[in-house]
C-alpha cells in the first residue's frame, strides 16, 4: 500500500503561488477580443460629434454608402425606430431620459457617436466615415455641474432638467453636535477632478446577429456582461436567452468597460443590417479617452466640521454636486455608492450630506476604480487633514484621535453599514515605521529652514467590496435589484480532470490562480491539477445577474461560489467513493496517489482515482445504484451574500460585505523653481484580511498606487468652455508610466473578515489612497504659505498658480475656523 | 476653444473702395491663406475652400460664409461655419472702417471657435498658427488695397 500524498499538507490559500495565467499572458499567448477573426467579418467605425451640445440638422451618409467596400451605414433615427431607449436606473426625472447608442436628434458630448459605418476593412470604414456629412446647429454647452443645475441650457428636454438625482443623507443629531462644538472648521469649496483609466486593451466588440437562429453572439471585453445583457435585452427587444456573451482574456478594465453596452448594441444592429455578418469594433485610444467613460467629478460645497476640544470630529455637513456627464447610464448608482463608506475610517456619528447629481455636456461617467467612494473618501481625508493643520494638531495625531478603534469592529456606521474588520492605528504604525517617519520629520524641519517645500502626507482609504445591490433602491425605490450573488461550477470531467467555471471575467486579477488555490485546498490536490475556465460565457450557466468582475468582490463572492461548488463536488465524490470502496464517508481521505488524484479509504488502503470516479458517473453508469443517480460530479453552486434590502426612507442598511483598507504615506518636495512635485518616499500598507495569494495582492497594490499617483499628479480630463476635451491623447492626458513611478515600499497587515468564509476581503480598488495621500503631502508642504489644497489634481502648473494667487493677494479664503474654547 | 484676433491697418484707398473690396468675395477670398476655391450662392452667401495643414491633420476645410452686417462704407461683419478633418469651426470677422485724411483705417477683429478633436490634438498649435494665417490675410489685404 503506497502512501497517499496530501497536497493539503500545506494550505494553498495564502501561498505565494505564481499565477497560472502568467505563462500565457506574458508570452503573448493570451486570446483577446481583437485576436478573434471570423469569416466574413466586417468592421465598424463611429462618426462622432465634434460638438459638445448641438442639434443634428441633417445627416447625409450617401457618399459613404456608395463607396466600394462599405457594407452598411446606421444612424440614430434608424436605431430609435427599431429599439427602446436604454433602461435608466434612476427615477424621474432621470427615467424620462431617452438614451440611444447613436445620437438621434441632438448630440450631448464631444465624441458622442452619431453614425456607424460598416465596411470590409477597418481602413475602408475609416475612409467611409470621413464621407459622412452631418450638419449641426450648435447649442449652449454646459460643462460645469453647478451651472447645469440652473437649467439654463437643458441637455435632455424630455427630462426637463439637468438634475439627475437629489437626496439628503442625515444621521445622528447634527445641530446638537455643532451647538456643542469647541471648534467649527468651514471649507467653502473643494473639487474632485475627472480622470479615467487607461487599460492596455481598449474596448472591443464583435457581434453577430445570426438570422438563422435569431440569436445575438457577442465576443467582447465587457467587464460586467450579466449587467450588459439585461440592458441589451430590453433595448433590442430580444429575449435575454437569445444573447450569448463570451469574454476571453481582458487587458484591464478598472470598471470602465462595464459601460460598453451601447457600442455592443450598435454592433448587433449593424450585424443584423449586414445580413448576419459578424461586425467588429475596436476602439481607438482617443475614442477611449474621450468617449468610453470617465470617473465621477464632484464638487463639495459649504462643508462644516464640528470638533470637540480634543480635536475629535463630532459632525460633518456638506453639499455634494456630482457631474455624471451627458448620460446617466450606470448612474445614478454613484449617488448612493459613496455612502458605503459614509464616515470613512472615522468615528463621527453625526452627519448631513446633501447629494445632488447633474448631467453636463461631457463624456458619461462610469464606475472607474474606487467608484464614487474615492471621491467621498478624498473629501473626508481633506476635511480631517485641513482640520489638523488649522487646529495645529499633527496630521498623524488627528487621525489617531478620530479613527474607528480596533476593538469597535465589527463597526456599524451611522448609516447602518457594517465594517467587518480593520485596524487603522496599526496600519499607521506600520506605515510610519516603514517610511521612518521621525527621520523624515526631522529632515523636513531642516529642509524648511533652507526654504525647501517638503510635505509629509497620510491617506487612509477603504475599499468596500461585494455590493448589496439593494442600495439601488435608495436611489430608486422601484429598482428591481437587491443582494448579490455569484455562481460557479466544479466538476470532474469524463477523464477525471477537475474543471472549474466561474461567472467572472478577469482582467489581470489572477482568478485562474486563486480559484485553483481554493479548490486545491478542498480536494487536497495541487492547484496545477485544476483547470479554471477563464472568461465569461452565458452558455456555461454559472452566472447570475451580478456576475462580472467589478467592485472588489471576487475574493469574496467569486471564491465563495467556487468554494461552495468544490465542497459540493467533494461531498458527491465522498458519497460515490464510499459506495465504491465499500466504506463510510468519514473513512475517506483526499489526496494524490500513484495514479493521480484519488479518494482513499483510510481503513483498508483501497483507493479510486478521479478517472475511476468520473468514468462510473459518465460512461459506465450501469454500475451505479439508483440511490446514487443524483451524483453527477458536476456541481453548480450559487453563493448569495447575506444582505437585506436597506431602509429606503432612512437610507440605512448594510451596503457592502467587506471593507479592505489602505494607508499610504508620501513625502513630496515641490521644487521651488519649477513647482514640479517630486515624490521622495512612499509607503503603501494594505489590509485585505486573509491574503489568498500574496504576490497577486501586492501586484494589485502597486497597480492601484500607480493609478492613484497618476490621477493625483498627471491625469486630468480637461474640457474647455465649449466642451472640447483638450486631453484626448496620451500627449495631453499623460497617463502614468513606470518612468514616473516612485519606489513604493509595500507592507500589509491582516485583519480577517468575519463576513467571508476565508477571512478575505475584496481588494484592488485602492487607487484612491495616493490621491488622498498626495493631497495631504502637498498640503503639508504648502500650509505655511497659506495655501489650501482644495482640488484632487495638482501638477506643477496648478501649484504655481496657487502660489502666485496667494502672493498677489488674489487667493480666496477657503477655510475659516470658529474657535469657541 | 476660442481664438481671438484683432488689429488695425491703414490704406490709402477711400472707405467706399475698401468696403467694396471687403464685401466682394471674388476680390478678397483669394487672399485667404491656402485658398483653394470659391462658390458664391447669392450676394450675402458664399463658400470658400482652403487647405488645412496642422501638424499631421491635413485636408480641406469648406467654410460657409454669410455677410450678416453690411453698413456701407462703415462696417462689414461675416459669420461662417466650416468643417474639416478633426473638427468644425465657427468664425466671425468684423471690419470697421473710418475715414482718414488720406485714406481709411481698417479696424478688424475676429474669433474662431474650434469644436472637435482638432482642439485637443492641435490645441497648442492652433493659436500661433491661426495668428500667423490671419496676419498673412491682413498683409494680403493691405497689399491689395495699396
Image: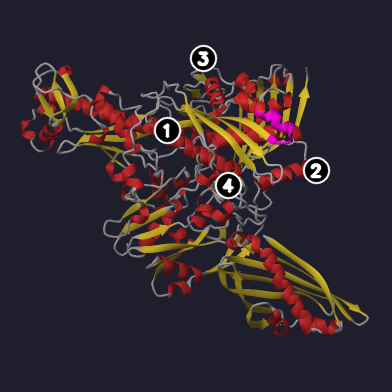
Badge 1: few (under 14), some or many (20 or more) residues near its Cα, within 10 Å? many
Question: What secondary structure is found at the residue carrying circle 4?
Answer: loop
Badge 4: few (under 14), some or many (20 or more) residues near its Cα, within 10 Å? many
Work out whether mark 3 precedes mark 4 in sequence or the reverse, and give the earlier one: 3
Q: What distance separates the C-alpha of mark 2 from that of mark 3?
A: 47 Å
Work out whether mark 2 precedes mark 3 in sequence or the reverse, and give the earlier one: 3
Report which quarter residue A628 is drawn in: top left
Q: Nearer the viewer, mark 1 or mark 2?
A: 1
Report which quarter residue A210 is drawn in: bottom left
Marks 4/1 in contact by CB < 8 Å: the verdict is: no
Tag 2 residue: A810
Task: Answer left or right for A364 relative to A15.
Answer: right
Tag 3 residue: A407
Work out whether mark 1 precedes mark 2 in sequence or the reverse, and give the earlier one: 1
Viewer-proximal residue among B67 and A12: A12
Q: What distance separates the C-alpha of mark 1 from that of mark 3?
A: 26 Å
- Which circle marks residue A697 in the picture? 1
Tag 4 residue: A715
Span shown in magenta: A443-453
* Residue A551 in sight from this viewpoint: no
Relative vertical location of residue A741 with respect to residue B45 in this rendering, above or below:
above
Question: What secondary structure is found at the residue carrying circle 3?
Answer: helix
Report which quarter residue A447 is drawn in: top right
* Residue B80 in sight from this viewpoint: yes
Amino acid at each position: 500500500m503506497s502512501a497517499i500524498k496530501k497536497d493539503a499538507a500545506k494550505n494553498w490559500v495564502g501561498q505565494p503561488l505564481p499565477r497560472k495565467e502568467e505563462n500565457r499572458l506574458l508570452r503573448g499567448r493570451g486570446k483577446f477580443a481583437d485576436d478573434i477573426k471570423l469569416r466574413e467579418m466586417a468592421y465598424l467605425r463611429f462618426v462622432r460629434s465634434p460638438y459638445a451640445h448641438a442639434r443634428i440638422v441633417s445627416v447625409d451618409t450617401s457618399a459613404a454608402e456608395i463607396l466600394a467596400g462599405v457594407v452598411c451605414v446606421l444612424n440614430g433615427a434608424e436605431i430609435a425606430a427599431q429599439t427602446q431607449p436604454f433602461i435608466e436606473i434612476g427615477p424621474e426625472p432621470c427615467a424620462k431620459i431617452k438614451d440611444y447608442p447613436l445620437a438621434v436628434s441632438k448630440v450631448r458630448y464631444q465624441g458622442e457617436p452619431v453614425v456607424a459605418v460598416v465596411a470590409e476593412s477597418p481602413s475602408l470604414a475609416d475612409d467611409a466615415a470621413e464621407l459622412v456629412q452631418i450638419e449641426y446647429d450648435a447649442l449652449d454647452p454646459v460643462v460645469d455641474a453647478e451651472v447645469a443645475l440652473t437649467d439654463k441650457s437643458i441637455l435632455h428636454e424630455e427630462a426637463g432638467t439637468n438634475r439627475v438625482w437629489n437626496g439628503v443623507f442625515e444621521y445622528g443629531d447634527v445641530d446638537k453636535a455643532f451647538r456643542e462644538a469647541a471648534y467649527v472648521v468651514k471649507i467653502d469649496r473643494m473639487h474632485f477632478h475627472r480622470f479615467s483609466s487607461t487599460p492596455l486593451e481598449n474596448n472591443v466588440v464583435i457581434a453577430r446577429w445570426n438570422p438563422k437562429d435569431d440569436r445575438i453572439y457577442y465576443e467582447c471585453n465587457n467587464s460586467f456582461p450579466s449587467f450588459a445583457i439585461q440592458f441589451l435585452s430590453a433595448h433590442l427587444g430580444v429575449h435575454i436567452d437569445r444573447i450569448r456573451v463570451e469574454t476571453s482574456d481582458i487587458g484591464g478594465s478598472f470598471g470602465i468597460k462595464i459601460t460598453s453596452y451601447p457600442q455592443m448594441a450598435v454592433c448587433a444592429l449593424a450585424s443584423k443590417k449586414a445580413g448576419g455578418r459578424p461586425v467588429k469594433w475596436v476602439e481607438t485610444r482617443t475614442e477611449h479617452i474621450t468617449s468610453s467613460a470617465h470617473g465621477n467629478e464632484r464638487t463639495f460645497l459649504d462643508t462644516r466640521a464640528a470638533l470637540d476640544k480634543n480635536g475629535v470630529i463630532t459632525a460633518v455637513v456638506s453639499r455634494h454636486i456630482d457631474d455624471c456627464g451627458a448620460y446617466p447610464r450606470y448612474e445614478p448608482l454613484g449617488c448612493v455608492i459613496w455612502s458605503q463608506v459614509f464616515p470613512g475610517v472615522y468615528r463621527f456619528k453625526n452627519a448631513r450630506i446633501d447629494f445632488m447629481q447633474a448631467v453636463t455636456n461631457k463624456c458619461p461617467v462610469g464606475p472607474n476604480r474606487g467608484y464614487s467612494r474615492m471621491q467621498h473618501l478624498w473629501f473626508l481625508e481633506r476635511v480631517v487633514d485641513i482640520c489638523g493643520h488649522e487646529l495645529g494638531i499633527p496630521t498623524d495625531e488627528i487621525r489617531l484621535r478620530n479613527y474607528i478603534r480596533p476593538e469597535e469592529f465589527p463597526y456599524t456606521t451611522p448609516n447602518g453599514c457594517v465594517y467587518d474588520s480593520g485596524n487603522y492605528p496599526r496600519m499607521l504604525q506600520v506605515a510610519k515605521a516603514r517610511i521612518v517617519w521621525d527621520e523624515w520629520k526631522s529632515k523636513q524641519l531642516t529642509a524648511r529652514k533652507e526654504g525647501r517645500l517638503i510635505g509629509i502626507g497620510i491617506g487612509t482609504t477603504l475599499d468596500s467590496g461585494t455590493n448589496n445591490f439593494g442600495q439601488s433602491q435608495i436611489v430608486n425605490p422601484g429598482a428591481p435589484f437587491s443582494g448579490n450573488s455569484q455562481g460557479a461550477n466544479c466538476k470532474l470531467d469524463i477523464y477525471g480532470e477537475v474543471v472549474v467555471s466561474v461567472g467572472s471575467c478577469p482582467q489581470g486579477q489572477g482568478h485562474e490562480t486563486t480559484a485553483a488555490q481554493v479548490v486545491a485546498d478542498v480536494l487536497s490536490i495541487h492547484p496545477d491539477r485544476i483547470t479554471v475556465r477563464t472568461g465569461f460565457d452565458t452558455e456555461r450557466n454559472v452566472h447570475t445577474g451580478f456576475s462580472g468582475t467589478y467592485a472588489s468582490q471576487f475574493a469574496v463572492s467569486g471564491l465563495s461560489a467556487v468554494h461552495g461548488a468544490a465542497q459540493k463536488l467533494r461531498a458527491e465524490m465522498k458519497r460515490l467513493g464510499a459506495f465504491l470502496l465499500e466504506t463510510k464517508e468519514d473513512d475517506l481521505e483526499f489526496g494524490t496517489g500513484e495514479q493521480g488524484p484519488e479518494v482513499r479509504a483510510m481503513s483498508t488502503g483501497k483507493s479510486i482515482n478521479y478517472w475511476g470516479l468520473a468514468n462510473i458517473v459518465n460512461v459506465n453508469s450501469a454500475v451505479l445504484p439508483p440511490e446514487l443517480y443524483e451524483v453527477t460530479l458536476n456541481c453548480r453552486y450559487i453563493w448569495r451574500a447575506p444582505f437585506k434590502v436597506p431602509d429606503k426612507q432612512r437610507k440605512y442598511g448594510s451596503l457592502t460585505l467587506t471593507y479592505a483598507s489602505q494607508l499610504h504615506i508620501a513625502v513630496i518636495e515641490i521644487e521651488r523653481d519649477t513647482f514640479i512635485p517630486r515624490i521622495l518616499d512612499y509607503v503603501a500598507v494594505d489590509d485585505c484580511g486573509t491574503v489568498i495569494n500574496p504576490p497577486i495582492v501586492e501586484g494589485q497594490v502597486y497597480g492601484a498606487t500607480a493609478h492613484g499617483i497618476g490621477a493625483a499628479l498627471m491625469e486630468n480630463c480637461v474640457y474647455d468652455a465649449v466642451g472640447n476635451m483638450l486631453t484626448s491623447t496620451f500627449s495631453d492626458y499623460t497617463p502614468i508610466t513606470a518612468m514616473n513611478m516612485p519606489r513604493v515600499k509595500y507592507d500589509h497587515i491582516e485583519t480577517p473578515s468575519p463576513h467571508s468564509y476565508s477571512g478575505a476581503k475584496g481588494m484592488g480598488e485602492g487607487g484612491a489612497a495616493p490621491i488622498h495621500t498626495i493631497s495631504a503631502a502637498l498640503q503639508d508642504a504648502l500650509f505655511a504659505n497659506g495655501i489650501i489644497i482644495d482640488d484632487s489634481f495638482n501638477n506643477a502648473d496648478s501649484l504655481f498658480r496657487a502660489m502666485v494667487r496667494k502672493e498677489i493677494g488674489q487667493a480666496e479664503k477657503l477655510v475659516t475656523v470658529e474657535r469657541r474654547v | 476653444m476660442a481664438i481671438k484676433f484683432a488689429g488695425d491697418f491703414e490704406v490709402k484707398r477711400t472707405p467706399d473702395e475698401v468696403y467694396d473690396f471687403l464685401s466682394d468675395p471674388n476680390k478678397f477670398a483669394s487672399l485667404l491663406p491656402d485658398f483653394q476655391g470659391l462658390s458664391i450662392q447669392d450676394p450675402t452667401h458664399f463658400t470658400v475652400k482652403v487647405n488645412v495643414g496642422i501638424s499631421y491633420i491635413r485636408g480641406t476645410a469648406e467654410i460657409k460664409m454669410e455677410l450678416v452686417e453690411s453698413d456701407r462704407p462703415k462696417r462689414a461683419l461675416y459669420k461662417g461655419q466650416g468643417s474639416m478633418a478633426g473638427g468644425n469651426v465657427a468664425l466671425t470677422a468684423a471690419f470697421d472702417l473710418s475715414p482718414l485724411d488720406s485714406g481709411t483705417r481698417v479696424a478688424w477683429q475676429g474669433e474662431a471657435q474650434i469644436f472637435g478633436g482638432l482642439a485637443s490634438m492641435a490645441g497648442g498649435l492652433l493659436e500661433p498658427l491661426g495668428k500667423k494665417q490671419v496676419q498673412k490675410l491682413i498683409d494680403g489685404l493691405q497689399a491689395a488695397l495699396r
